[in-house]
Amino acid sequence: MPKRLIPMILCLVLGLVLALGGTMVMAEGRQITLAAPKVLTENGFLKHLLPRFTLKHRVRVAVVPNGAAADVTLAPDGAGQAVFEGAGSRWHLSSLEDSAEIQRFSDWLTSDIGLNTVEAFEGPDGLQYTRVAIEAAAEEALDLTGDAANGLAVSNLHCKRCHVVGTADRMSGINSTPSFFVLRAFPDWDERFYSFYALNPHPSFTRITDLETKLDPMHKAAIVPVDLSLEDLDDIITYVAGLEPADLGAPIQLQ
Ligand code: HEC
């Protein structure tokens, strides 16, 4: 490569790093507390559920012990709205107060998207939770406020190693990895992007800085970790929203 290209590339990388650094702040104070018994914590269920909500709505959920004062409570066979059931209990959601954040959480948990997330959980010994038939809240509208240009830049930086992310690189990527065009063709493409970091193979190398997610212990030092902020993820999703979905012909099955 010609010598004068090297400083140019360095500048570009530095620019990107600075741009990413600037977007890593999450709105302060948007947090609610959730009281739940140990069974939901110990089997990994809340760890599966809550980050997905936080990613989408920017509201952190701090879990406090059962019985402690909390904004919302998940309790078996208690008061409130029955939401899901499993392992012999029917889980009810209740809240003492009402705030925009609390409302968001209960709307999300009782929406199709929230309930799909509940049902996607696989606990020890094949434990699963299933929704209790309730009127699902209205489908959530996709809120695309990100910066598509930054979304492309971040995708080029972090995802292009494996995925085809844009028209300029149609011929690159890894064959067995779905391109962003293919992913965009799924009706639930946005859900897949909002939770990609929790789906294999990403956990072993991806950290969402705002959520303080830890790298999987399986992480191999040879793989450069991907550090993303929630802002970056929004930008990627805004970028992907504008892509033309691949024409898949017959429905294809991923996974
Ligand atoms: C080291 C390679 C690698 C990198 C880097 C990578 N991915 Fe992936 N990704 C994969 C593979 C492999 C799959 C297919 C997994 C499967 O189908 O089981 C996948 C699947 C996905 C899916 C579909 C998940 C689903 O619901 O099935 C999304 C969305 C996704 N990746 C987003 C991203 C984004 C965004 C980035 C960059 C921030 C990224 N990936 C970086 C390898 C990678």
Image (cartoon, grey):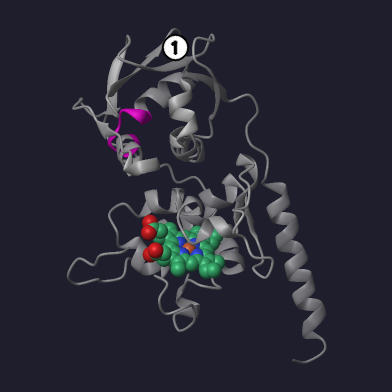
Q: Is residue 148 visible?
A: no
Q: Quadrant of residue 27?
A: top right
Q: Is residue 81 magenta?
A: no
Residue 220, image x, y percentages: 64, 65
The picture places residue 187, in percent across and down from the top left corner, at 27, 54
Picture quarter with the N terminus: bottom right
- Magenta stretch mostly in which secondary structure? helix
Q: Is residue 190 left or right of residue 209?
A: left
Q: Which residues are magenta?
A: 108-114
Q: 117 or 164, which lies in front?
A: 117
Residue 254 x %, y %: 30, 64
Query: Quick one: 24 or 35, which is closer to the camera?
Result: 35
Which amino acid lies under the numbered mark 1 shown in the image of this protein? Asp
When asked about the image quadrant of residue 170, the answer is bottom left
What residue do we see at 65% from left, 28% from top? Answer: 28
Q: Is residue 14 left or right of residue 138?
A: right
Where's residue 8, x and y in %? 78, 77
Question: Which quadrant of the figure contains the C terminus?
Answer: bottom left
Q: Is residue 32 left or right of residue 254?
A: right
Rendered residue at 44%/53% (across/down): 193
Q: Is residue 109 magenta?
A: yes
Q: Residue at x 32, y 9 (%)?
A: 79
Q: Nearer the viewer, residue 74 or 170?
A: 74
Give the SS element for disc 1: loop
Image quadrant in which you'd find residue 161: bottom right
Residue at far bottom of view: 2
Residue 173 shows in this picture: yes
- What residue is disc 1 on? 98
Q: Residue at x 57, y 69 (%)?
A: 156
Mark 1 Cα-neighbour bin, 10 Å: few <14, some 14–19, many ≥20? few
Q: Is residue 239 placed above or below 167 in the rendered structure?
A: above
Q: How many marks?
A: 1
